[in-house]
Amino acid sequence: EATARYGARNPASERALAEAADVLPAGNTRSVLFHAPFPLAMARGEGCHLWDVDGHRYLDTLGEFTAGIYGHSNPVIQQAIVSALHDGLSLSSHTLREGPLAHEIQRRFPGMALLRFTNSGTEANLMALAAATVHTGRRKVLVFDGAYHGGVLSFGGGGSPVNVPHDFLVARYNDLEAAQTLVRTHGADLAAILVEPMLGAGGCIPGQPAFLHGLRALADECGALLILDEVMTSRLSSGGRQAQLDLAPDLTTLGKYFGGGLSFGAFGGRADVMSRFDPRRPDALAHAGTFNNNTLTMAAGLAGLTQVLTPAALDALNQRGEQLREGLNAVFAQHAVNLQFTGLGSVMQLHATARPLRSAADLAGADDRVKALLFFDLLERGVFLARRGLVALSLPFGDAQADEFVAALEAVVAARRGLLP
Ligand code: PMP
């Protein structure tokens, strides 16, 4: 009944997808965006609002899966892009922009003694893994069940046939003993431990500090590199999750908001590892990419970091996220339904279970239909989030928007009480 009403309300979205399906499988080119019966097609965004092609207005609580921290129309970002545009695109050269952006990132992540840019977080992780295997002369990589490091580095359910053919060992997240056992057996062959400080796409399940620090010690013990994937968690403080936990990885990977909303990735860390990318070295590792220093991304990223996203602004955003998550979970408690939002700061995820979540395995048995129901009901009330339940706040999202979200959830939960666990 909810999807029938959705279909009737959104004929232009349905048509847009159907037309694109002639050339794109199911009309789609980002698997995460697809859901049954068809996803909405958006026409434009402003601040923290979106308008779909059928003319509905939504409160955007998704914020481009954490990349859209500036909102849709930040004037500083817009001005930086326009100014770079006027200087001409694709200059086939070094420009005056990549150095300052790299310096700004290093100021925030001092562990990144040397770094390089890519076009995506996926590429950043691929390059970090390449650096680790070359540096150590080893092949194996320890990752965690439910982790997402990119479209070809995805470990929900253990792995994916499209993953790059590294020699992966997959351990349970937040289970230091399991990791220890694997390291005891394979430590001499281990190039890297690759880990998200919070399972992001895997459900916004925070890594316990003792687990993450334990991985640091395990890497030291066996001579592997610890690669911290902060593509999503870098927004939790101006120095990322590693600053909050006082955790020092060998390499860090970044992406998302550092490009000001344009495509971006970066990997970096220890100088002795990263200097292999110095082209003057006879044994230099190649790292190419036509758009690695594209001027629009460099300009938008630099303007965002230097003029908009001060440490104080970022802390305030994450504080607002904490309050919002409390408000949303209070709705569930008040109606005595077994649902929860997990996460940290301004990033959170809906789950159709109230049990404490420590790893992907704890999600077994949660009924996905419950999330579908809340998703379609919230859309009808003008609140847009990811179909899977991800929420990531943007700077224009203020207290009034938080109240609006909580009120919409409260109405939906009250109306569907009988169908919820
Ligand atoms: N790592 C993490 C933790 C991510 O959340 C993502 C993207 N959701 C990636 C890597 C991949 O980044 P991109 O989509 O830019 O390739």
Image (cartoon, rainbow, N blue to C red):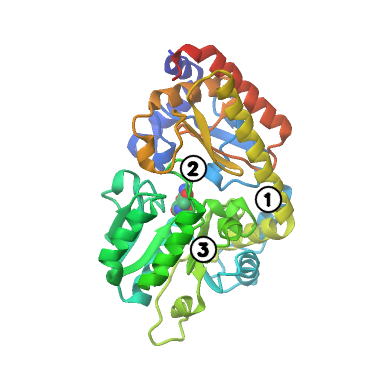
Amino acid under label 3? Ala
Which marked residue is nearer to the observer: mark 1 or mark 2?
2
State the separation of the CA atoms marked 1 and 2. 19 Å
Which residue, given by chain and number where applicable, does mark 3 sit on? 266
Residue 46 is at least partly visible in this image: no
Which residue, given by chain and number where applicable, does mark 2 sit on? 204
- Find residue 421 and report its image quarter: top left
Task: Give me the residue at 47% from left, 19% from top.
Answer: 6
Dot 3 or dot 1, earlier in sequence:
3
Q: Residues within 10 Å of mark 1 (few under 14, many from 20)?
A: many
Q: Are marks 2 and 3 in contact (CB under 8 Å)?
A: no
- The x and y percentages for residue 351 are 46, 31
Determine the secondary structure under disc 2.
loop
Q: Residues within 10 Å of mark 3 (few under 14, many from 20)?
A: many
Amino acid under label 1? Leu
Q: Are marks 1 and 2 in contact (CB under 8 Å)?
A: no
Which residue, given by chain and number where applicable, does mark 1 sit on? 314
- Left or right, 319 with respect to 93, comes to right
Q: Is residue 217 above or below residue 150?
A: below
- Find residue 402 and report its image quarter: top right
Which marked residue is nearer to the observer: mark 2 or mark 3?
2
Amino acid under label 2? Cys
